[in-house]
Image (cartoon, grey):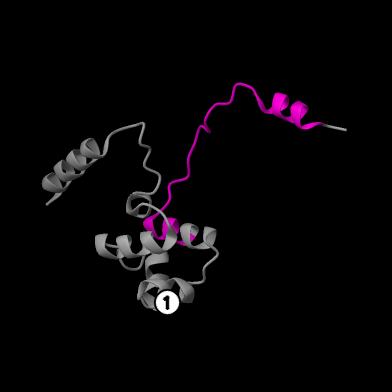
Amino acid sequence: MTTGRKVRTALRGDFRPARSRRPLSVGQSVRIARELNELSQNELGARTGIAQSTISAIETDRIKLGAERAKMLARALNVHPAVLLFPGWRTEDESAAQWRRKYSESKETHD
């Protein structure tokens, strides 16, 4: 029989982060957060006042989430809005200020 101590000992070790990450879209991050909260699109819509069809369109990346909707959804899903707006962003890689600066610079060069 395996005891809790043996399991804890076996789980201690040198773990490294996964080498690759699958990039998520904004819509996928919304869907995952909704499903983790065990909510249907209709239930999330009732909590936020956002139509189910709009939530569906956000989750399938047919329309942009936007900051205001992100705040509403984040409150209902108990997450920070950045989790929904910037899926896969690793905080140890760069600060938010650095990211905003890079994003602004790239928009200026492409506009």
Residue 92, how many percent across, how many down? 36, 31
Report the residue marked by disc 1: 46
Residue at point 44%, 58% (across, down) = 28
Extreme top residue here? 14
Residue at point 47%, 76% (across, down) = 42
Label 1, secondary structure: give it.
helix
Give the mark count. 1
Is residue 46 or residue 29 the one in the foreground?
46
Location of residue 102 with respect to 52 vertically, above or below: above
Residue 110, how many percent across, how many down? 15, 48
Highlighted range, magenta: 3-31
Q: Is residue 66 magenta?
A: no
Q: In this orientation, does residue 110 appear? A: yes
Amino acid type shown at disc 1: Ala
Q: Quadrant of residue 38?
A: bottom right
Q: In this orientation, does residue 60 appear? A: no
Extreme right residue here? 1
Residue 46, how many percent across, how many down? 42, 76
Q: Is residue 30 magenta?
A: yes
Location of residue 55 with respect to 7 vertically, above or below: below
Say which quadrant the N terminus sits in.
top right
Residue 97, how many percent across, how many down? 21, 38
As drawn, is 86 to the left or to the right of 44? Answer: left
As drawn, is 77 to the left or to the right of 39? Answer: left
Q: Residues within 10 Å of mark 1 (few under 14, many from 20)?
A: few
Residue at point 12%, 44% (across, down) = 109
Is residue 55 or residue 20 the one in the foreground?
55
Residue at point 16%, 48% (across, down) = 107
